[in-house]
């Protein structure tokens, strides 16, 4: 979720002007339908029109009508906050139950908790979509049962404070951590940390997340700080070499070399603190796990580190670092840095929070029950999306649950925990679990369509995920086999929304078993509207090309609220989808 500053008036004016001017006659050419994901939490949090206590149904209806007037044909309703429902549920608690809300947005959180108890958002979204000529589909995620930071974190107990304010972990999993995918028991964080500290650090290389000129980190203002305990930091006084430049694609990059650092924690700071810095001004920004942050020892070997951020202003002395979910940002007066090795509590069971182990029968029953509650509503269809708030750079280290160990023994005659194993075979065991889940979900829909918003098949290349439009929270699943042949043969999946890149040519009649599989593309709105845009990205050209691509059945935009930040883009899309000159 990203906080936005809603400026609704220009967007609404552009819509009303279009309606007054009238629409041209749509041509007979075939165009894909445009669909949009509606994250109800974001609308309640950031659309301030109406009562501050309840997101009034009249305001919500106005937004639904606006979406329809833009030309969208379908709304995907996001129905939960990870492990907490936005609708009356008997399987998972409702948002706000037990005091579990967003602590950083107390007023907005109270508004959501009260609103979803005032009216049923699923029921009303379906009614309103149908009233304004759109389909209403439920949006659900098989890997959205909690949130995990990118290092090998663990949680203990069920107390809210003990889960580091991860209040949205489904209580079913808090009571059974062993139901999440478990890490390879033979590969501990201690071993990774010992390896990382075998030799001193010799080089740090950083590449920014997008074009930024001029580079804010320079030889004149960069400083390094080190610590043994993340409490007391000291500045590195030994001279080092700082170089900077541009990558082939024009992204800023810098390298700090000739180091000889041996420490538990390292921070990249400034020679003079930015006391008067704008707290919203980013000096430099990196995405964790996207090939932008690298640390090497003095032998030139890359080592494992956990990237972190100092979230308070510095006053000459460096403050503590805390782990970051998926990025490393320096907001002028802040610093970024890293722990040398992998963080976690070695005494606790190692699990990847948020990602269930679908080869465990109790997990399968619970997840299907969650889905079946949505299927009990008269939604027109269902979208299973693999985006996840849980992230790790080492997804292949997970999936070693005892149940999987037994399956591996039965299939291949060897012990997954103590003997060499084949990673592809291990991943296939998990992939079969996902296929079983989709089939069971489909069985609850009464024949209504089920779509899968997902990644290219593994045979298109190990890095097939890395396309022009990477979707947030999918990297952990890029090596997972997507068993399209089985989905189509069993009839569990009726449509594919392609993430990252277009691989529509893959879906030949032979692979779909003669079925008509509807194929669409997925676009992450915040990436191409307000942040992290692909190089030289042209929104209008992209939307026009997609609109005129007769090979596509659908374009899925995630999510509508982002258009409030850029009303001129919303106005363009309205003209395009309504066939205006």
Image (cartoon, helix red, strand yellow):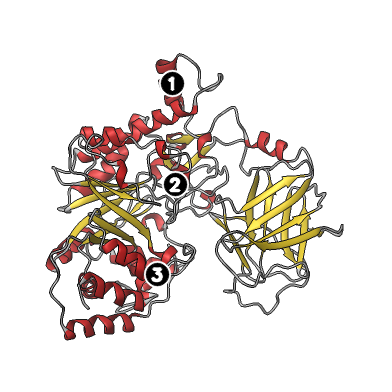
Sequence-first disc among 1 and 3: 3
Label 1 CA crowd tier, 10 Å (few <14, some 14–19, many 20+): many
Q: Nearer the viewer, mark 1 or mark 3?
A: 1
Comparing 104 with 371, the one in front is 371
Residue tagged 1: 408
Which is nearer the N-term, disc 3 or disc 2?
A: 3
Instruction: Quadrant for residue 514, please give it.
Output: top left
Q: x, y percentage for residue 515? A: 17, 39
57 left or right of 457 in image: left
Answer whether residue 215 is visible to the viewer in this image: yes
**Where 127 sits versus 501, above or below?**
below
Callout 3: SS: helix
Distance in Å between CA atoms under marks 3 and 2: 35 Å
**Residue contact between numbered discs 1 and 3, judged by CB atoms under 8 Å:** no
Q: Residue furthest right?
A: 238
Q: Position of residue 254 (x, y in %)?
A: 69, 60
Label 3 sits on residue: 108
Q: Secondary structure at mark 2?
A: loop
Q: How many marks?
A: 3
Q: Which residue is mark 2?
A: 465
């Amino acid at each position: 979720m990203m906080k936005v500053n809603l400026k609704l008036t220009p967007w609404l004016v552009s819509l009303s002007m279009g309606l007054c001017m009238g629409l041209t006659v749509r041509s007979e050419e075939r165009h894909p339908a445009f669909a949009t994901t509606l994250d109800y939490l974001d609308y309640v949090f950031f659309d301030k029109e109406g009562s501050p206590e309840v997101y009034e149904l009249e305001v919500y209806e106005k937004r639904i009508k606006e979406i329809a007037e833009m030309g969208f044909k379908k709304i995907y309703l996001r129905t939960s906050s990870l492990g907490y429902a936005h609708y009356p549920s008997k399987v998972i608690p409702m948002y706000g139950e037990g005091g579990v809300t967003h602590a950083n947005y107390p007023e907005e959180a109270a508004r959501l908790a009260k609103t979803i108890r005032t009216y049923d958002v699923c029921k009303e979204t379906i009614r309103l979509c149908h009233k304004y000529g759109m389909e209403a589909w439920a949006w659900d995620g098989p890997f959205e049962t909690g949130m995990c930071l990118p290092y090998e974190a663990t949680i203990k107990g069920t107390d809210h404070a003990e889960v580091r304010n991860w209040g949205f972990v489904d209580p079913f999993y808090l009571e059974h951590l062993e139901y999440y995918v478990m890490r390879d028991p033979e590969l501990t964080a201690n071993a990774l940390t010992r390896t990382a500290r075998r030799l001193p650090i010799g080089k740090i290389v950083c590449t920014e997340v997008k074009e930024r000129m001029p580079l804010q980190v320079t030889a004149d203002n960069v400083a390094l700080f080190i610590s043994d305990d993340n409490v007391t930091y000291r500045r590195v006084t030994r001279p080092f070499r700082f170089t900077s430049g541009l990558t082939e694609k024009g992204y800023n990059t810098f390298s700090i070399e000739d180091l000889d650092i041996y420490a538990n924690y390292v921070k990249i700071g400034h020679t003079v603190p930015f006391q008067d810095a704008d707290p919203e001004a980013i000096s430099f920004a990196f995405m964790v796990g996207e090939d932008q942050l690298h640390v090497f020892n003095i032998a030139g070997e890359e080592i494992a580190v956990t990237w972190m951020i100092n979230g308070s202003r510095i006053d000459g002395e460096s403050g503590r670092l805390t782990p970051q979910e998926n990025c490393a940002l320096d907001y002028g007066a802040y610093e970024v840095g890293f722990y040398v090795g992998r963080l976690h509590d070695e005494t606790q069971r190692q699990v990847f929070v948020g990602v269930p182990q679908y080869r465990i029968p109790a997990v399968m029953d619970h997840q299907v029950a969650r889905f079946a509650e949505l299927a009990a509503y008269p939604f027109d269809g269902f979208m299973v999306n693999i985006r996840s708030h849980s992230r790790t750079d080492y997804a292949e280290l997970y999936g070693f649950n005892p149940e999987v160990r037994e399956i591996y023994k039965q299939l291949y005659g060897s012990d997954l925990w103590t003997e060499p194993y084949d990673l592809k075979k291990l991943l296939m065991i998990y992939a079969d679990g996902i296929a079983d889940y989709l089939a069971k979900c489909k069985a609850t829909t009464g024949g209504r369509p089920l779509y899968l918003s997902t990644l290219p098949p593994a045979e298109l290349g190990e890095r097939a995920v890395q396309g022009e439009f990477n979707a947030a929270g999918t990297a952990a699943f890029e090596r997972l086999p997507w068993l399209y042949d089985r989905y189509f043969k069993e009839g569990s999946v009726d449509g594919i929304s392609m993430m990252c890149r277009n691989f529509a040519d893959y879906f030949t009649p032979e692979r779909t078993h003669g079925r008509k599989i509807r194929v669409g593309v997925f676009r992450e709105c915040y990436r191409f509207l307000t942040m992290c845009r692909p190089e030289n990205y042209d929104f209008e050209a992209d939307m026009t090309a997609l609109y005129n691509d007769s090979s596509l059945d659908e374009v899925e935009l995630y999510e509508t609220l982002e258009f409030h930040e850029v009303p001129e883009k919303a106005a363009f899309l309205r003209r395009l989808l309504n066939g205006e000159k």
